[in-house]
Amino acid sequence: RPDHKANWPDACLSDLAYTLRDGVLLCNLLNTIEKGCFDLKDVNQKPQMAQFLCLRNIKTFLQVCQDVFGLKESDLFEPSMLFDLTDFYRVLYTLSKLSNCPKVLKKNIPGFSIHKPRTSSQEDIYRNLNASEDAPPLTPLGDQVEYAHYDTHVHNEEIYQDLCSIDKKSTLPSQLPTASHSLEKRDYVINELVETEKNYVDVLATLQRCFMRPLGSILKEEDNRIIFTGIKELCEIHAGFHSQLRKVVAPGSMARLSEVFLNWREKFLIYGDYCANLTNAQNRIQEICAHNDSINQEVIRCQQEANNGKFKLRDILSVPMQRILKYHLLLEKLIQETQPNHEDYRGLERAKEAMVDVAQYINEVKRDSDTLQIMKDIQASISDWAMPDNTELKDYGRLLKDGELRIRAHNDQKVKVRYVFIFDQVMLMCKAQRGDQYSYKESLLLCEYKVEDVNNRRTLQRDSRWNYQWFLVRKSERTAYTMYARTEDLKRKWIKAIQDALDNIEPAGCRNTDHKFVMYTFEKPSTCSHCSKFLKGRIFQGYRCDRCFIGVHKACIPYSGRCGAKQPPELPPRPPLVTTPTDVPSQPVQPVPPMPSDWGRTWTDHQVLAEYLWFVGEMGRDRATNLLERQMDGTYLLRIRPQGPTHPNETIYALSLKTDDKVKHMKVYEREMEGTQHFYLSESR
């Protein structure tokens, strides 16, 4: 790949080292040279830098080098030399031996040689790349770029362009005005948006007509569900979305293009599940076709009918993911061709931000889906751990770091070797066993502990490699552990992982608010009460207040305002804040949960309020006005007033209502009458 960072003119050795570090590219290299030389299921294509998965990939690479390509054991590097980047020369030495083995030379792939470093300064170049100033910073698990899949991305983009793009030289539709040169450019962008959407709707219809229906009768129900999950819903959504786009660009239309995107953004969240399932869908159809010839022949027939066999089903399934990630780019082009004084300029900027938010939501859902699979792998690898009932490893948060440490409990002077997993809320200590299995030994709830660093290094005299220590001390001072790492750099990374976990449990921003925020997994797509952007991912997407139940991003905690303290009365269910498009066949609407008849005056008694679409948490007048002014009359929201009550009988709530094309704000009052609390909007006059 010419544009890979490792091929840049100023690339350094660490760029190549970090690219190879998870073992994915190395395993894919062997499979490219010798198809089927190992079972692809033995390689985790998205290890997200989880050490035990990366080492498993590296071990697979080394084993195949020995078993299939005939390398000697003396030719191989140790897995830790690559993952810890302690001896990259040895890694290159192994690759040199691989490049010159008979199987590779038969492929007419030129080999290379590497000479042993002659001086200590030359050796230092290959050792401890982790400590190199040129080394890229280690990213949190899941944040690394997936270089190994670049060719797939390029292939998918080519398919998308072939199926959805339009001829740039095509004439503009007659209904679009072309009064000036700049306006003509803008109209070309609008035309591209509408016409590519039409082509995309055709792709979805083809998937449903040529593949989903004919294959549905011969595939098992479970296979059919996995392969075509979401296709029917996407067809319905984009038929309506395209219809709205056409209406808004029609002559005489008073509607704004930006409103179409803002009104449909929540519908697009279905792409999170679709993209997370895409790899499973593609693998499943490939696996079925490889083992069932009759189904394979039917798939080939369907591909012939759909596009004369030009694209495979697995390729076409990637088009939706490509499309949803194009909207913010198209809107960016449109903004560039729109004058700042245009009536929809600000609206288009908001629409672009909304589509970026949707794209980020989708990426995080996809990434968390991979993370959850890693959590399952870890849980399956640990024996002798009796977890609490109805509890899974994912309930303790994301994996932040894993690896080997030496640990000494202060009530037991024996130093023990432990494989440690640090999650957001818990530290697991295990004993490594054969076959990448672990025996559970102990777990610590990190909220009960604090880190104490020490400068004295000379502690483990028997093994000078484990001289870098720190303390993990229980806040009650009853228990403490001394932990030892092999290097100062590893010690620093372990301490940072623990401190990151502690900050996730109790963010620094919580010290300046009276909210009781805790990490929380939102079961349904939710938005931040401060910035109104989506809380992203599948687990622990943000924080929820245990008292008023508002949800926020971690970064938004300092701006979350004061906590509410009272519960409003029951209000009838109303449409969501963003109006629902009418061109989509309606889905069964889930009933709004009734408020309990015995509701009390404090929010801490209930967790129902946050489920109501009309409640937005703390919000000022200006923001409420901005949200409602572009909605239809009758749209309303209930909010917490940042300034709180200022007069007797006032509550902390206000009702904001769009009526007569204006937004009005009304305080909510309460009064006890005949032993019952009554809520009202104003004193009778």
Image (tube, rainbow, N blue to C red):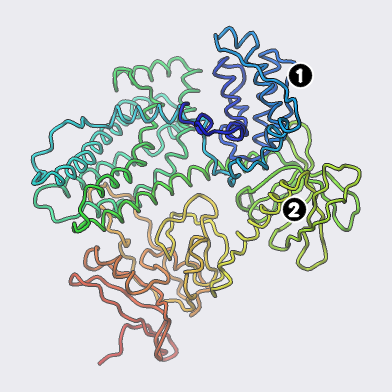
The x, y position of residue 481, in whole percent, is: 81, 56
Q: Amino acid at mark 2?
A: Ser
The x, y position of residue 152, in whole percent, is: 45, 28
Asked if the residues shown at circle 2 and circle 1 are in contact, with their CB atoms under 8 angstroms apart, the answer is: no
Residue nearer the viewer, 399 or 242: 399
- Label 1 residue SS: helix
Which residue occupies 50% across, 61% down? 555
Relative side of 114 to 233, left or right:
right
Q: Is residue 440 visible?
A: no
Quadrant occupied by the C terminus: bottom left
Which residue occupies 87% across, 51% down? 459
The x, y position of residue 215, in whole percent, is: 38, 25
Q: Is residue 34 above or below residue 159?
A: above
Give the class, few, some or many, for how many residues have Cα within 10 Å of label 1's Cα (few <14, many ≥20): few
Label drawn at residue 3: none
Which residue occupies 18% across, 72% down? 660
Give the class, few, some or many, for how many residues have Cα within 10 Å of label 2's Cα (few <14, many ≥20): some
Q: Amino acid at mark 1?
A: Glu
Which residue occupies 44% across, 68% down? 609
Q: Which residue is mark 1?
A: 73
Image quarter of residue 85: top right
Q: Is residue 121 visible?
A: yes
Q: Is residue 187 above or below residue 93?
A: below
Relative side of 480 to 513, left or right:
right
- Numbered marks: total: 2
- Label 2 residue SS: strand
Q: Point out the frontmost of discs 2 and 1.
A: 1
Residue nearer the viewer, 439 or 297: 439
Residue nearer the viewer, 389 or 143: 143
> Rounded to the nearest whole Å, what is the CA distance between mark 2 and mark 1?
37 Å
**Going from the N terminus, do you reach mark 2 or mark 1 first?**
1
Q: Which residue is mark 2?
A: 443
